[in-house]
Amino acid sequence: MTTFSPTTADALARQAIELPSWAFGNSGTRFRVFPTPGTARDPFEKIADAAQVHRHTGLAPTVALHIPWDQVDDFGVLRRHAEDNGVALGTINSNTFQDEDYKFGALTHEDESIRRKAIEHHFACIDVMHATGSRDLKIWLAEGSNYPGQSDMRARQDRLHDSLQQIYARLGDEQRLVLEYKFFEPAFYHTDVPDWGTSYVQVAALGDKAMVCLDTGHHAPGTNIEFIVMQLLRLGKLGSFDFNSRFYADDDLIVGAADPFQLFRILVEVIRGGGLNNPEVAFMLDQCHNIEAKIPGQIRSVLNVQEMTARALLLDREALAAAQTANDVLAANAVFMDAFSTDVRPTLAAWRESRGLPADPMAAYAASGYQERIQADRVGGTQAGWGA
Ligand code: AOS
Ligand code: ZN
Ligand code: ZN
C-alpha cells in the first residue's frame, strides 16, 4: 500500500491533538525532578515550544493551560502570542489540589467557606476562558479519603453535585465543562469521582454542556477502556480524552509507548462511534516528560496517535461485520489484527510530504536548531515545572 484512500487521507488531515502546557515544564517523581537545559521558564515559552510540535507535525494546533500554573497578567496578550506562533489556546484546567485549604476536599468539602473558595476558583477559570477563547473547562478533583469511615461518601456526592451545578450555571453558551475521573490517587480508599459511571451521573445531572473526560491512565489494570469509549460515545457524553500510557498507575508516559494495541483498540471505537473528526470529542495529551526531552517527547506522542489512527482507519469494517454476523470468531479477529499489523509508517511519511510537512518530524525537529537555540538563550530565570 503506497497511498491512503481519500476518506482515510481526509480523516487524517482533520486530526487535531491538544498539547498540555505542563508537558513543557520540568517534572519528575516524588523522588526527584530533573532539570533539562532549555526548559521553558514561563507560559509564553511553553507555548512557543508547543508551537514547534505543530510546526513539524501539523497535528497539534492548540495548547491547554493550567490555572494557576499558567497565570499571567493579561490572557489576551498570551492569546495573541499563541496566534503569532501559529497555535491557539485550548482547554483550561482548574487546580484544587495544591492549596492547604483543600486537604480534606474542595468541591466536596463540608466547610462551606472552603467549598465556596473552590467554586470561585472555577469562576475565575471561566473568566480566563473568555479571555483566551477556550471552549472547555476541565475539572479533575483530587478528593476522597484514605480510611473506611473517614468521610460520608454520600454527602460528598451531594455537595459535589451542588458545586458543579453552580459552576455549570456560570458557563457561557459556547462553553463546556468536562469532568475527569480517576480511580485512586492522591486519595487511596475512596475517590469522589473514581470512574466513568460517577462522572456520567454527575454531568448528566447538569445538562448538555457537561461531558465526561476519559484519561487513559486512570483505570485499574485490565480495564477494557475501549468499552468505556464505546459506551460514552453511544450516550453522547464523551467530551474529551487525556491520552498517555501507563505500566502501573497514573504513569503519564508517552501515549502508545506501553501498549500500542490498546491505543489502536480505543481508536477503532472512536471511529466506530463517530468520534474521530467530531468537534464534540477533544483529543488531548496529559503527559509529563521526566527523563526524555520535552518537545521531541510531544512530537513522538502525537505521531503515535496518528499512526494508530491510520491503522484503525484501515480496518475493513465490511469484512469485520460479515465475520461478526456469521459468528466467525477467528475470521473477525483476523480482520481486526490485519489492520493493527499494517505498517503505515512509509505511507504516512509520503502523505506528510505531499502536504508540505517533513516526512520524519522527529528528524526535522532535531535538524531545526531550535533545541540548541533555547538551550543557549534560556539561561537565567527559573524553569517551569509541574506545579509552576
Ligand atoms: C491527574 O491525575 C489528572 O490526570 C489531571 O488531568 C492532570 O494530570 C492534572 O490536572 C495536571 O497535572
Ligand atoms: Zn488527566
Ligand atoms: Zn492523571
Image: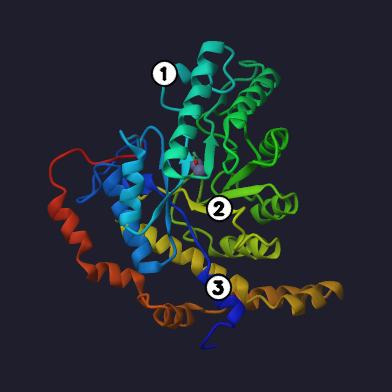
In the displayed structure image, the side of residue 41 where residue 313 appears, left or right: right
Does the numbered disc 1 mark a residue whose Cβ is under 8 Å from ligand 1? Answer: no
Q: Image quadrant of residue 337?
A: bottom right
Q: Residue at x 53, y 39 (%)?
A: 138
State whether residue 31 appears in this view. Answer: yes
Mark drawn on residue 365: none
Quadrant in the picture for the N terminus: bottom right
> Which residue position holds label 3?
310
Which of these two is toward me, 82 or 114? 82
Q: Residue at x 50, y 52 (%)?
A: 284
> Which residue position holds label 2?
282
State whether residue 27 appears in this view. Answer: no
Q: Position of residue 165 (x, y in %)?
A: 64, 27
Which badge, 1 or 3, is on the more N-terminal residue? 1
Q: Position of residue 9 (x, y in %)?
A: 55, 77
Mark 1 vs mark 2: give the one in front: 2
Which of these two is toward me, 295 or 276? 276
In the displayed structure image, the side of residue 324 where residue 310 appears, left or right: left
Q: Secondary structure at mark 2?
A: strand
> Which residue position holds label 1?
100
Q: Secondary structure at mark 3?
A: helix
Marks 1/3: CA–CA distance: 46 Å
Q: Position of residue 156 (x, y in %)?
A: 65, 20
Which amino acid, mark 1? Glu
